[in-house]
Each structure stands twice: as structure tokens, then as C-alpha cells.
Image (tube, rainbow, N blue to C red):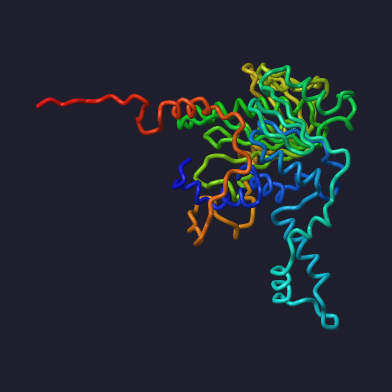
Amino acid sequence: MGKSSKDKRDAYYRLAKEQNWRARSAFKLIQIDEQFDLFSYSDPSKCTRVVDLCAAPGSWSQVLSRVLIKGESFGRRAWVERMAKLKTQTPRSGDSSPSEADLNDGVRSLDLDDTKSTLKPRENVKIVAIDLQPMAPLEGIVQLKADITHPTTVPLLLKAIDPDFDQHNETHRIDLVISDGAPDVTGLHDLDIYVQSQLLYSALVLAMKVLRPGGKFVAKIFRGRDVDLIFAQLRLVFERVHVAKPRSSRASSIEAFVVCEGYKPIKDWTPEIGSALQIPVTTERTTKGGQQSYDSDKQSRHLREDGVVEIHFEDEETDPKRWIAPFLACGDLSAWDADATYKLPEGHTSLPPVQPPTAPPYKEAIERRRAEGGAYGKTKDPLRVVIKP
């Protein structure tokens, strides 16, 4: 991207470099965590094994490393912790609480580096990052160069988590699986949405093989015409499904994040990578109008001949309504607007990227362009064009 492009004036792009993040997408995970408590701060033991799919360049893995391993806090959570600390440090007159002016003065004088003394690292944290692209090392992160759409990735992942991994032992299974992967967009929205849904399917299949009961799954999606079908299918194996749009995600983008909580594994069944996702109707089946179904939690699931599972609710005839996944905006509304262009302050110095790409797909093109003399048609042996009168 050029130095005069909009991305250079994007607030989150600049904040990522100022706060030592590898990419602006780190703010997306932080804001989703603020809304859904992905990292289980109330009970840290419930989130110690995490898998980051499509991890490169590593911004989400960087958040995991700094939050789970180092015990740092970011965003609204860090602000609340600092305010609570200020209230205990600010002198009081009698029994009155500190005024807003006192707190504001304390915020200005507070040394943010002092938060290191209040770090809360977790024990026995294991984080695995998977991507086809190489990624610069991160503290405490086990990196795998693998393809999440290939069946051989699952054994590699299980071995990386624990050499003695036992899928029947819930204490060995994964607490959280996150995926920020997306295909190289073509501009053809229908094609991009389809390819993204296939990537989401691969991430979901892998997650269902390693998640513990009650685990969480977060993945990027592209909102399209039939995206509600994906939400309904996710409801088959998760108790709660929400769609989140972080403040740091541009409103002009069709991306969003599906947040699934309360994983419910289906007994004696796990999906296979590389095959169609056909969720069984379970062994307890009844026949209704020639269709196989079962009733649970006031809903019926019907398996069609093409393998698609339809969900019908008990009261849909008396109260017909379509189930729609709740859509939530994450992040403080007073925060920076990702779509806005902000004027740079005087004397602003552009910072280099925290971690340049290690092996970008365009590396060969850049090297060839340099070898040929530049990007504007200049070559080592320019042709002379002689125009005769």
C-alpha cells in the first residue's frame, strides 16, 4: 500500500504500530473478547489451551501470548483495572469518593508501564498457531506450517498440544479455537463468500475434532444472502451463536465474526476433513411424513436427501418466525472509527511495520520489478524510439 493511501491514515493501522501489534486485526480480537469474555477472566482455568488457525502474520497469536502467557490486559478491561487502581490510590476527604477531576488527574499521571506489576499470567498455557505461510516466532507459541483443509493437519495439531493427547480425556481437549483466515478476494462477492464459507467449514471441522464440551469457536465470515443458513447449522453443535462486528472492522467491509459458545459434541460422531458436512440426526429417530427427525429443546431437525439439515421449531406454525443470529457491535462507540480518515498531527513520523511479512506471495514479483529497474516501466536497457520526419 502506498504512503498516501487511506490505510496509512487509518487510526487502527497507526495504533497497531504504536502499540507494537503486528497487524490492526489485533484490535478485532480484543474487542470481541470485551463483549464475549473469550478468555474466561472469571475462571482462567477454562481457557488455557487455544488454537489459532490461519495465524499469519500473527496478530491474534500475539494477543493470545500477551494475554494468556504474560497476563496483560488491553482495551476496556485494562481501563477498568487502571481506574480501580486509581480509586484506591487517590486520597479521599472523609468518606467521600474521589471526584472525576481527581481521577482524570490520576489517569494523566499514571505510568502505564506500572501495569507490569499487576500481570496475571496463567499456568499450563498451550497455544498452537497454524498457517501455510511462515510466521515470525512468538513467545510461548507453537507454530505449525500446515493446511487446515488437509486431514493430516489434525494429528500434527494434537501432537503439538500434547504428545500424550487423549481425545477421550476432556482435560486434554481445546478450550478455544479462533480463525481470522480469509481468501484473497477477487471482487466477485458471490465467489468470495463461497470460498470463505469453505474455509469456515474446514476450520469448523478441525475445531469439532479437538474442542472440549462447552468450548468456544470464533471465525471470520463474509455476510451474504444465504449466510443465515451457516448460523442455523452452527446452532446444531453450539448452544449460543452470535455475529460480531468489531469497531476496528470497517463498516464498508462485508466481514464479520461468528462467535459460537457452548460446544455440544454429537455422540459417536465427528466430521471428516475433505468430505461433506452431514450432521447425523442421532440414533433415536422417529418418522414424520417419511422424514427422519428427532425432537430436542423444542426444535426438530430434518435430514434431507441432499444432506442438508433443516431446523424447525415447535411453535413455528402458531408463531411463524425465522431464527436470526443476534448481531452485536463490539467495542466502545467513542473509539476510533475504522472508516474515518483522521488528520495526522504535525511532526508525525511514520513507523515501520512491527513485523514485515516473512514470505509474502508477492515477494517474487517485487524482486523481478527491482531487477528490471523499477515500477514505472524503466528497464536496464531502455529502447530508443526514433521518429523520422
Count of labels in the image: 0
Q: Can residue 265 be seen in this view?
A: yes
Q: Which of 106 and 249 is in front in this view?
A: 106
Image coords of residue 285 (percent x, y): 78, 21
Q: Nearer the viewer, residue 348 or 81?
A: 348
The image quadrant of residue 128 is top right
Q: Residue at x 12, y 25 (%)?
A: 388
Q: Is residue 166 visible?
A: no
As drawn, is 62 to the left or to the right of 268?
Answer: left
Residue, far bottom: 94
* Quadrant, the C terminus: top left
Image coords of residue 370 (percent x, y): 45, 29
The image quadrant of residue 282 is top right
Residue, far left: 389
Image coords of residue 159 (percent x, y): 82, 23
58 is higher (above) or lower (below) than 292? below
91 is higher (above) or lower (below) than 245? below
Q: Nearer the viewer, residue 362 or 221?
A: 362
The image quadrant of residue 235 is top right
Q: Residue at x 72, y 23 (%)?
A: 279
As drawn, is 192 to the left or to the right of 325?
Answer: left
Q: Residue at x 44, y 47 (%)?
A: 4
82 is higher (above) or lower (below) than 141? below
Image coords of residue 188 (percent x, y): 45, 30
Q: Which of 264 and 57 is in front in this view?
A: 57
